[in-house]
Amino acid sequence: MIAAKVLVCDPIAEDGVKALKECGAQVDVRLGMSPEELLSVIGEYDAVVVRSETKITAEAIAAAKRLQIIGRAGIGVDNIAVDAATQRGIVVVNAPTGNIISAVEHTIALMLALARNIPQANASLRSGKWERGRFMGVELRGKTLGIIGLGQVGSEVARRARGLEMQVVGHDPFLPEERARALGVKIIPLEDLLRQSDFISVHTTLTEGTRGLIGAEQLAMMKPTARVINTARGGIIDEEALYQAVEEGRIAGAAVDVFSREPAVGNKLTESDRIVVTPHLGASTAEAQERVAVDVAEEIVAHLKGEPVRYAVNAPFIPPETLSFLAPYMDVALKAGLVAQQLCEGQLKDVQIEYAGEISQHDVTPLKAAVIRGLLLSISEEPVNIVNAELVAQRRGLRIVEHKGPSHDIYSNLVGARLTTSAGETTVSATLAHDGPHVVLVNDYWVDIPPSEGYLLVCENQDRPGMIGAIGTLLGDFKINVSFMNVGRQERRVSALMVLALDEALTSEQLKKVKEIPGIASARLVRL
């Protein structure tokens, strides 16, 4: 039993409140408080539970003198000032797995509704019409389902699709091949998935890298009979392009549960009779709400008892003496992982993290977490940090090996990420300079990529006169500005690596033209 006071600010399932009370805590349910009311009472409590309505601001945390833990009954923690909580040593937990099955089942429900025109047929009959011939559907059996993003939700959708006797293909570069085989999923490039699939379901997270992932160009690759489902995040699919593709008959239909702006009343997609729309119902089941409430209650009880928690989303307090040395290198480690993930090709097999120099004499757990965060930043459904990095990596089936060594001949401290995939190895190492993290090694080429924002064009090419000019001329034709460039080479007149920082991204067609320059062996675009 624990002697603690818990404040529940938003509606949660009664089973969650019950779990808190059964451990001996005093639970006060106070819904709909204004920010001023919250400030006036939060100082009395050891734990706070919220959903998405109540905002736990930095000001509220400053007033919470007794607070030990904040629980979010759901996944997102945008309404919690996590950094402020971390500085105060307050743990923030969420319930990232509680609504997975509900989201999965909603995806399958939308796919079936789309295949059989159920919403349209229901509306027609209710309006007094009997139009059997108008609503001819298609079977799922034997059709190909393409899944973009095979995290927790995408993997469970794949399992159920196999049960419906569908062929399942997927696109997720960070899904190890053995896990894909266990799921019965054939991993293929995104363009092949778009061209081959009868149904396409999106299950990736929304980042700058995935915003607009499916636009007019990608929709044009799909079969005229293809149908698209999105229960992941609004903004991953270009809504205007999707509306036009459906209305013009270039694809057969779509089903959408999430929108770029919500509430989505008046959204263009709601105007089409060929698009099934629901108001963000993926997690809206009684069972899901019960699970997230119980999960977050169990996390709070465990922490108040002094036991470890599973789903902490913020880093624990780092002693000042450790932070003063390691903190700058966390950005170095993050950049190494971020760049390596975008440069590698093929399906990931394993990850090696290498630490060289004085940093290797410290507890490198924060650096490992930063590398993993960089690797998964664009594909993980949940935040990745020092607390949960190992758990997130394990759930995705990643094999991670660490190596420590002495200082390099040139650099006193290096953090490196070496990714082994079905296509080979990709190595990126970074170090700390006076102005921040510098990437200094890409594969076998020593370079110097200073801190910057925007995009990198990374080209491996023959080391001969005219190569820099050829790329510069082409970028000029594209009206894309270059802010800096750096060249690394192993041996004169053999091969070199050009790195150019761009103010804006190349389109896929422009990148294709870069690759067509004689002497260019490979070209990749990296978003920083």
Image: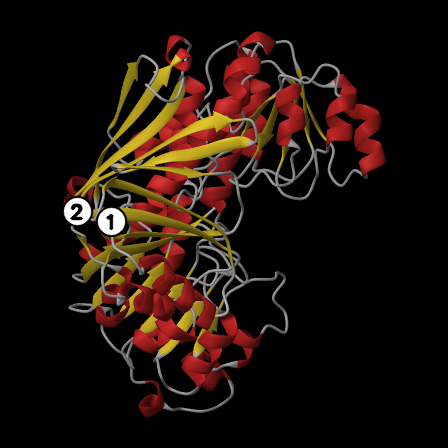
At numbered mark 1, what does the secondary structure look like: helix, strand or loop? loop
- Closer to the camera in the image, 345 or 95: 345
Q: Is residue 101 above or below residue 112?
A: above
In the image, residue 127 sits, relative to residue 526, either above or below, namely: below
Q: State the image coordinates of residue 5 (x, y, percent, origin top left).
A: 68, 17
Pointer 1 local density, CA inside 10 Å: few below 14, some 14–19, many at least 20? some
Q: SS for tag 2? A: loop
Marks 2 and 1, how far apart at CA = 6 Å
Left or right side of 34 for 474: left
Name the residue beneath numbered marker 2: 423
Marks 2 and 1: CB-CB under 8 Å? yes
Say whether disc 2 or disc 1 marks the residue closer to the N-terminus: 1
Residue picked out by circle 1: 345
* Disc 2 crowd, CA 10 A, few/some/many (<14, 14-19, 20+): few
Eyeballing the image, is 177 above or below 109? Answer: above
Q: Residue at x 73, y 30 (%)?
A: 58
